[in-house]
Image (cartoon, rainbow, N blue to C red):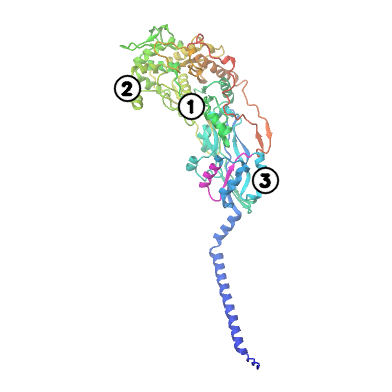
C-alpha cells in the first residue's frame, strides 16, 4: 500500500486563526477586567461607607455600660442599700448563630433553671442584635471553673463582672426599703429599652420601687474591638454611665433596731413619725424577711417558705395591713363632738355598763360590765368608756363622723412615698349601699364609734392621726425620703400640709393632750409611765372573734390567733411633741401590752439617741471567687427571720386583771 503524501501546511492561515484566538482571549479578559474595575470603582466610590460599617461591625461593637445604682442611707448616713460586684455569665447574640442551642449546652455548666432560661428568652426577644445579655448572675466557684475549661466551645459567651444590690442589714429594713429583682416580662413591655440597656435589675417594692427613676441613673456606651471568639482586644471609645442618685431617708437606724427588737416573736407593726414634719422615723412590719434572697433570683423553695407562711412575712403590715383601730380613735372622735357642739368638757353622762338605741332592746355593752358611773370627756378617755362614745355617736350620726374623721386621714391613703398603700375603710351609708346594696343601720354607727364594725385603719394611718392630734390639728404628709443627692433634682416635702377644720380653741387640744397624759399616768396605759418625760397616749383592743349577745369574752376557749389585737398610739413629750408612735400587736390581747412595746421606742428617741446612739457593727468580710471582690457576710436564707425567736419574758401580754383596755 502506497504512503499518502503529507498535506502542505497553510502557515498564514494558521497564524491568522491563532491571532484571532489571542485577540478574542485578550478581549474577553479585558472585558472581565473592565467589569471588575467598574464594580470595584462602584463599591469604593458609592458603597464605601456601607461596607466599612459592615466590616467594622464584625470586629467593632458598641456595648452598653449599665449605671451604678444610687446608694440608700438612713438619716445619719448609715448605709442601708449597697452595691457589690459579682461574676455573671453573659452572651453576645451577634457572635452566635443558634442562641437557643448554645443556651441548652450551657444548662449543665451554669445549672440554669427553667426560670433562668425563660427570663433570658423574654429579654432576648426585645433586645438589639448586638446587645450583650446576662444569662446568670452570681456564679459559684465551680460554675466559673467548669466554664473556663470549656470556654473555647462557646464563642460569644464570657464571664463579666457586674454590680448587684446588697442589703447589709438583712430583714431590718426589708419592708420599707424593699428590694430589686430581675426585670420581668410585664416590666419589659413598659421600660425604656435605651435607659435600661445592659441592666437586669429593677426596684420591686418599697423605696427601691418608689424612687426607681432616681436610683437607676443613665447607661453609658463603649466601642470595643473583639475577635471571632468575642474576646475584647482593645477599647476604642467610651461614654461613661451616670450613676443614680443617693437617697437619704428619714429613718433612724437605732430607732428601727429598737422597734424591731420589741417585735421579735410577734406579728404586727410599729410606725414612728415626727409630728412636726411628717418624717417617718421607724417603720417595722413583723415578721420580716431577707431581701437579699430576691436580688439575683430567689429559689422556689425559699419563695414557697415565705409565701406559704401563715405569718405572712412578705406582707407589709405597717402600710398595707387594715385593722379595726379599737379605742385608739376615741381622742379624735371626742374632738369631733366638741367641733359639732354636741359635747364640751363639762358634759357628763351616766354609764350603767351598756347603751341601747331608743325603741331597741339590743344592748351595746361597755368593756366594763358594771359601767363607769358619771363620765365626762376626760374620764371617758382615761378609762376608755365605750358607753360615752355610744351616746356621742348616736347624737352625731355617721355622716358627720365620716366627715370629721376623714380629716385625720382615715378611709383614704396618706400619700406616703411607698407603693401599695392601703386606704383602710371608714364606712358610710354611701359605701354600704354601693358595695352591699343595703341601707345603713344605726347600730352600725355605734360599732364604728369604738373602732369596730367595718372601720379599719393601717398602722401608718393611726400614726398620722396621732401626729395630727399632737400637732393641734395640723396635718402633715408622711414620707421616708429626706433628701437626695445626684444628677436628678427632686423637691422633698418638709413640714406641715394643712390644718383640719376645727370649730374650737387650742385650749381644747391641750385638754385632750392632758387627758391622754392621764391615760398613761393613771389610766389604761399606766404600765409605761415614766418620770423623765410625759407621754400622751391611748390604748385600744380590737376584737378578732365576735362574741354573741349576752356572752362574755373567754380567752381560755380561744386559739392564740383568735385573741384580741392590742393597739397603742401616743406622742411625747406631751408638751412639745417630737415623736408619735402607733403600735399594733396581733393577738396581743390588750392595749396595755402594745403600750409596753412603745415605751423603749420613746426612751431611745428622747433619752438615748443623742448620748448613746445605736450603730451597726461592721460585718466580717469573706474573700473568694464568688464575687469579683470582697463578698459581704452571708445572711440567713431561711426567709422568715423574726417569727422563730422566743419573745423576752417582759414582752408577755398582761392578764385581763392588769389591763382591760
Please give the residue where the numbered disc 2 appears in the rendered image: 439
Q: Nearer the viewer, residue 558 or 572?
A: 558
- Please say if the residues under marks 1 and 2 sit with CB atoms less than 8 Å apart: no
What span is colored magenta in the figure?
Answer: 117-139
User: Which label lies toward us, 1 or 3?
Assistant: 3
Q: Position of residue 62 (x, y in %)?
A: 58, 50
Please give the residue where the numbered disc 1 appears in the rendered image: 319
The kind of secondary structure element at disc 2 is loop
Q: Earlier in the sequence, mark 1 or mark 3?
A: 3
Q: Nearer the viewer, residue 223 or 629?
A: 629
User: Which label lies toward us, 3 or 2?
Assistant: 3
The kind of secondary structure element at disc 1 is helix
Disc number for residue 79: none
- Please say if the residues under marks 3 and 2 sit with CB atoms less than 8 Å apart: no
Identify the image quadrant of the N terminus: bottom right
Q: Position of residue 438 (x, y in %)?
A: 32, 23
Query: Can residue 239 be seen at all in this image of the molecule?
Result: no
Residue 329, above or below 248 = above
Q: Residue at x 48, y 27 (%)?
A: 319
Structural distance between the alpha carbons of marks 3 and 2 = 73 Å
Q: Earlier in the sequence, mark 1 or mark 2?
A: 1
- Residue 37 among those drawn in magenta: no
Q: Position of residue 109 (x, y in %)?
A: 63, 43
The kind of secondary structure element at disc 3 is helix
Please give the residue where the numbered disc 3 appears in the rendered image: 148
Amino acid at each position: 500500500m502506497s504512503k499518502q503524501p503529507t498535506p502542505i501546511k497553510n502557515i498564514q492561515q494558521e497564524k491568522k486563526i491563532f491571532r484571532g484566538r489571542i485577540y478574542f482571549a485578550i478581549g474577553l479578559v479585558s472585558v472581565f477586567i473592565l467589569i471588575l474595575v467598574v464594580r470595584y470603582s462602584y463599591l469604593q466610590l458609592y458603597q464605601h461607607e456601607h461596607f466599612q460599617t459592615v466590616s467594622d461591625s464584625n470586629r467593632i461593637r458598641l456595648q452598653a455600660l449599665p449605671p451604678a445604682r444610687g446608694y440608700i442611707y438612713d438619716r445619719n448616713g448609715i448605709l442601708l442599700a449597697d452595691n457589690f460586684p459579682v461574676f455573671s455569665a453573659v452572651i453576645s447574640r451577634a457572635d452566635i448563630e443558634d442562641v437557643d442551642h448554645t443556651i441548652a449546652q450551657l444548662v449543665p455548666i451554669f445549672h440554669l433553671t427553667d426560670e433562668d432560661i425563660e427570663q433570658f428568652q423574654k429579654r432576648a426577644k426585645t433586645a438589639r442584635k448586638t446587645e450583650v445579655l446576662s444569662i446568670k448572675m452570681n456564679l459559684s466557684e465551680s460554675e466559673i471553673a467548669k466554664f473556663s475549661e470549656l470556654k473555647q466551645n462557646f464563642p460569644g459567651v464570657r464571664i463579666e463582672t457586674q454590680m448587684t444590690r446588697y442589703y447589709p442589714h438583712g430583714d431590718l429594713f426589708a419592708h420599707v426599703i424593699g428590694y430589686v429583682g430581675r426585670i420581668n416580662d410585664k416590666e419589659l413591655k413598659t421600660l425604656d429599652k435605651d435607659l435600661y440597656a445592659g441592666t437586669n435589675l429593677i426596684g420591686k417594692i418599697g423605696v427601691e420601687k418608689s424612687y426607681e427613676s432616681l436610683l437607676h441613673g443613665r447607661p453609658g456606651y463603649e466601642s470595643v474591638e473583639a475577635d471571632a471568639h468575642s474576646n475584647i482586644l482593645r477599647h476604642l471609645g467610651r461614654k461613661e454611665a451616670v450613676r443614680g442618685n443617693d437617697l437619704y431617708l428619714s429613718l433612724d437606724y437605732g430607732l428601727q433596731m429598737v422597734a424591731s427588737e420589741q417585735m421579735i416573736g410577734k406579728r404586727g407593726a410599729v410606725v414612728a413619725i415626727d409630728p412636726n414634719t411628717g418624717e417617718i422615723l421607724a417603720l417595722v412590719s413583723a415578721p420580716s424577711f431577707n431581701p437579699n434572697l430576691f436580688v439575683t433570683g430567689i429559689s422556689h423553695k425559699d419563695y414557697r417558705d415565705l409565701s406559704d407562711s401563715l405569718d405572712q412575712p412578705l406582707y407589709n403590715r405597717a402600710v398595707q395591713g387594715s385593722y379595726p383601730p379599737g379605742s385608739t380613735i376615741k381622742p379624735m372622735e371626742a374632738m369631733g363632738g366638741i367641733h359639732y357642739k354636741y359635747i364640751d368638757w363639762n358634759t357628763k353622762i351616766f354609764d350603767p355598763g351598756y347603751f341601747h338605741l331608743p325603741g331597741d332592746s339590743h344592748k351595746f355593752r361597755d368593756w366594763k360590765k358594771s359601767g363607769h358611773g358619771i363620765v365626762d370627756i376626760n374620764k371617758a378617755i382615761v378609762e376608755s368608756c365605750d358607753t360615752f362614745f355610744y351616746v356621742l355617736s348616736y347624737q352625731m350620726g355617721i355622716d358627720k363622723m365620716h366627715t370629721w374623721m376623714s380629716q385625720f386621714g382615715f378611709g383614704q391613703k396618706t400619700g406616703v412615698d411607698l407603693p401599695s398603700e392601703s386606704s383602710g375603710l371608714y364606712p358610710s351609708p354611701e359605701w354600704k349601699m354601693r358595695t352591699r346594696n343595703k341601707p345603713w343601720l344605726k347600730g352600725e354607727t355605734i360599732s364604728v364609734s369604738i373602732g369596730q364594725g367595718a372601720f379599719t385603719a393601717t398602722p401608718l394611718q393611726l400614726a398620722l392621726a396621732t401626729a395630727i392630734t399632737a400637732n393641734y390639728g395640723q396635718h402633715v404628709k408622711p414620707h421616708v425620703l429626706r433628701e437626695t443627692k445626684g444628677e436628678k433634682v427632686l423637691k422633698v416635702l418638709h413640714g406641715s400640709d394643712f390644718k383640719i377644720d376645727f370649730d374650737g380653741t387650742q385650749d381644747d387640744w391641750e385638754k385632750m393632750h392632758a387627758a391622754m397624759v392621764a391615760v398613761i399616768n393613771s389610766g389604761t396605759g399606766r404600765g409605761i409611765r415614766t418620770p423623765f418625760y410625759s407621754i400622751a397616749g391611748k390604748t385600744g383592743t380590737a376584737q378578732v372573734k365576735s362574741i354573741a349577745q349576752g356572752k362574755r369574752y373567754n380567752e381560755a376557749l380561744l386559739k392564740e390567733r383568735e385573741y384580741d389585737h392590742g393597739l397603742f398610739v401616743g406622742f411625747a413629750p406631751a408638751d412639745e411633741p417630737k415623736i408619735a408612735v402607733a403600735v399594733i400587736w396581733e393577738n396581743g390581747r390588750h392595749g396595755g401590752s402594745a403600750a409596753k412595746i412603745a415605751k423603749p421606742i420613746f426612751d431611745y428617741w428622747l433619752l438615748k439617741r443623742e448620748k448613746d446612739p445605736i450603730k451597726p457593727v461592721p460585718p466580717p468580710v469573706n474573700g473568694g471567687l464568688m464575687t469579683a471582690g470582697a463578698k459581704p457576710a452571708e445572711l440567713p436564707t431561711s426567709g422568715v427571720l423574726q417569727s422563730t425567736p422566743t419573745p423576752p419574758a417582759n414582752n408577755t401580754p398582761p392578764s385581763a386583771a392588769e389591763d382591760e383596755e
